[in-house]
Structure formats: structure tokens, C-alpha cells
Image: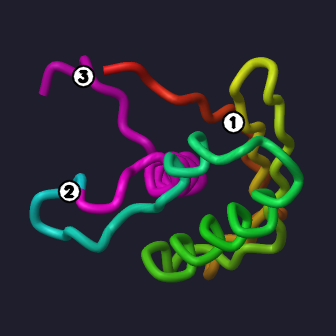
Amino acid sequence: MTNDIGTLLNEDAIKRSVVNLVRTKVGERFFNSLLGSKVESYFFELADSGIVDPLQEEIKNVLSNFEPRVVVRDVNVALYPEDNELDVTITYDIVGLAVPTQAINFILQPTRY
């Protein structure tokens, strides 16, 4: 009514959903305790190349289980242990829309409570 909140449509809504799924912890949503990923637990592992493959699989699994609007093409994770960051790039196609392949890049950092 007041137009103070922007509406996300099509590609933008799907992009937001993909990022939210990756950043949501398992059990964080009250009415769907299975929704989310275990990505945050990788912040407490040793930052070496051994965590890249399991992390990529975790992201692929959460998206294939909870986001039927996308088909994941590729997930790349770059480690930056000195900054305690993970640089994630997800490449995907949107099902049912004639748009080019989409790519999202974002940084994951542990948050302090």
C-alpha cells in the first residue's frame, strides 16, 4: 500500500532465495526444521582444500532439496583463511524461464553473537 518495501520478481526473487537457503542454518526455521544448510559448521574446520568439496556438495544438496526453480550448474568455493571468509560462486539455470545462466557471488563470514 505504501510502497515502502520493494517487491522482488523473477530472477531477483530466485537469487535472494538461493542466498537465503545457503545462509540459513538447519533448524533455524520454526515450521520447517529440515530447511537450511550446514555451511556455518565449516567455519570451525581447518581452512584447507579438504573442506572445499564437502562444502560444495552441501550447497548443491540444499539447493536441489529446497529450491526446485533452479538447476545448479556449478558451485565454486575459495578459501581466505587469513580473513576467515569463504567466497562462494553459484552458477545455475532457472527452470521455466528463458533467461541466460545466472551466477551469484557472495562472501560467507562467521557472525558473532
Whole-percent x and y of residue 34? 29, 73
Q: How many marks?
A: 3
Q: Residue at x 50, y 80 (%)?
A: 68
- Give the mark nearer the N terminus: 3 vs 2: 3
Residue at the disc numbered 1: 106
The relative height of residue 30 versus residue 53 in the rendered view (above or below) is above
Residue at the disc numbered 2: 29
Q: Quadrant of the N terminus?
A: top left
Q: Is residue 78 left or right of residue 58?
A: right
Whole-percent x and y of residue 104? 73, 46
Give amino acid for label 1: Phe
Residue at the disc numbered 3: 3
Mark 1 or mark 3, which is nearer to you? 1
Q: Residue at x 54, y 48 (%)?
A: 19
Q: Foreground: 69 or 87?
A: 87
Label 1 packing within 10 angstroms: few (<14), some (14-19), many (20+): few
